[in-house]
Every structure is written in structure tokens, then in C-alpha cells.
Amino acid sequence: MLILLPPSETKRPGGARGPMRLDALSFPELTAARASVVDALVALSADPAEASRVLRLGATQQGEVAVNAALRTAPVMAAVDRYTGVLYDALDAASLDAAARRWLGRSVAIHSAPFGPVRALDRIPSYRLGAGASLPGLPALTRVWADAASAAIARHAGGFVLDLRSEAYTALGPVPASVTSAYLRVVTESADGTVRALNHFNKHAKGALVRALAGSRPRIGSVRALLQWADASGLRLREGAPGELDLLV
């Protein structure tokens, strides 16, 4: 199973001494695309005013330009530790034991804007770039990533993909129809049976789900197997619309 997570706008600073090695990241077929996006982002950062406009940075976010300018030489850390925010706080990968972290490294990919999908333990620097940005000299990120990332996901799917990404990042690499997959929605159900999607708790529930999976490290190759694991784990996971699973919280 391959679990696809979205990144987070907020990131933990610091890390081990760089530089970042694009050729050491998982999904090596994406190295050329990664280099083109990193080059464009670093070049943009040479003009702080233009970088602020393109990246839509506010007055208190100007330090992000310097972060991007140092992208190739900055400290690095495991992607799953780099990201912070509701989902990653609920996952709390740093507190997992070594076996659970190894499972994350094998089974989880985080889909970033500058690097495409990377494995959870791939070492990346901090950066500022969202899925909707358009970098000078490059086409839209959907055009940079979509076909290449989709092919990489298909190649490394492991038989089944559980997609926990937001719509913006799903567009950067849709799971091909040839791959057995399910898109996860987090919902609540009222007394009359009405189902409603959640926002804030959506991220928390996704992080908690991945943490539970890492803790038990099941072998899952289908929707049926995932549903059986969830039922045994006391989680309310069920089939929703075609190609979707609903996690009830």
C-alpha cells in the first residue's frame, strides 16, 4: 500500500547539515522535474519583491524568500518531521518507535510542490511554495508534475493507493485509473443519517489514521483489507461514493 499525504504550509526549521540531494530522493524518475522547479524557485528569490508577489507573502512572511534562496544548501530533515500543522501534529511521527517509522518510510509519500511526491523519510529542506503558484520560466505546476507524478505513483503503488491529499495536490499527480485506489473523506453523520464533510477535524483524523496504521503496520493491498483492518481497530471506515472511503468521526 502507498498512502499519499498533502504537505503543510507550516514547517519545522533547521535539520541536519545539507545540502539537499535531489538524486537521493525516492521516485528518482522525478529528478529532472525537481531540479527545474528548485532552480526556478531559487532564481525567483533573487528578487524579493517579485518573489513576495508570486508567492503571495505578507509583511510578516518576508523571511520565506531567504528560505527559498538557500534551498540548495539548507539543512535537511525527514519530510514527515519537516511538516507541522494539524495533520502532522496528530501523526506525531517523532514519537513513533523505529519500526513504525520504517513503515512510514516504506508506505507513505508526501506530495510537495517543489519536489513532487517524496517518501516520508526522504530528507528535504524547508521551503515556501504552494500547489497553485506559477513560477517564472515554468508552466503551471500541474503541467510540470501531473503526468510525471502520476506515472511515478503508478510505478510505486504497491498494489493499492490510499489518497489523503487535498484537491490541489491531487491535481499535481492524479492516481491513474489503472491503479487500485481510494480517496479518503472525513465525515460526520447526524442522527437523521445526513453525512457532512469536515474541515479542521479532517486533517486531525487523517493524521491519527496514519499513526494508527504505522503502529500496527498491517499488510494491505485492497479496499477490503483496509476496511477489515479498520473494523478490527475500532475505526468507522466505510465505502462512500465510487472510488471513495468515508472515515466517520
Image: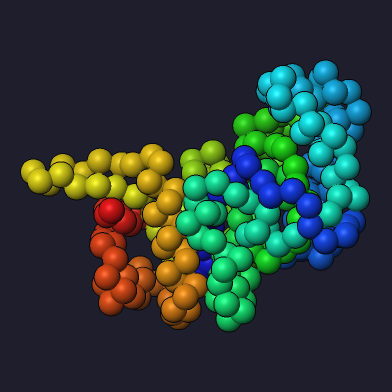
The picture quadrant where one finds residue 64 is top right
Q: Is residue 172 above or below residue 62?
A: below
Q: Residue at x 89, y 33 (%)?
A: 43
* Picture coordinates of residue 240, whole percent (x, y): 27, 53
Residue in the foreground of this view, choosing between 165 and 172: 165
Q: Which residue is depicted at the point 72% across and 28% down? A: 61
244 versus 135 height, above or below: below
Total numbered badges shown on the rendered structure? 0
Which residue is painted at 47% across and 66% down in the image?
Answer: 211
| Viewer-closest of 173 and 238 | 238
The quadrant holding residue 59 is top right
Colour style of the rendered protein structure: rainbow
Q: Is residue 147 visible?
A: no
Which residue appears farthest toward the left when viewing the image? 192
Image location (x, y in percent) of residue 35: 84, 48
Image coords of residue 54 (percent x, y):
74, 23
Q: Name the residue rendered at 89%, 56% in the picture.
A: 19
Q: Is residue 84 left or right of residue 135?
A: left
Q: Which of these two is toward me, 240 or 179?
A: 240
In-image side of 7 versus 60 (left or right): left
| Rendered view: 235 above or below 136 | below
Asked if residue 8 can be seen in this view, the reply is yes
Residue 186's spot in the image, x, y percent? 34, 50
The quarter of the displayed image where residue 154 is located: bottom right
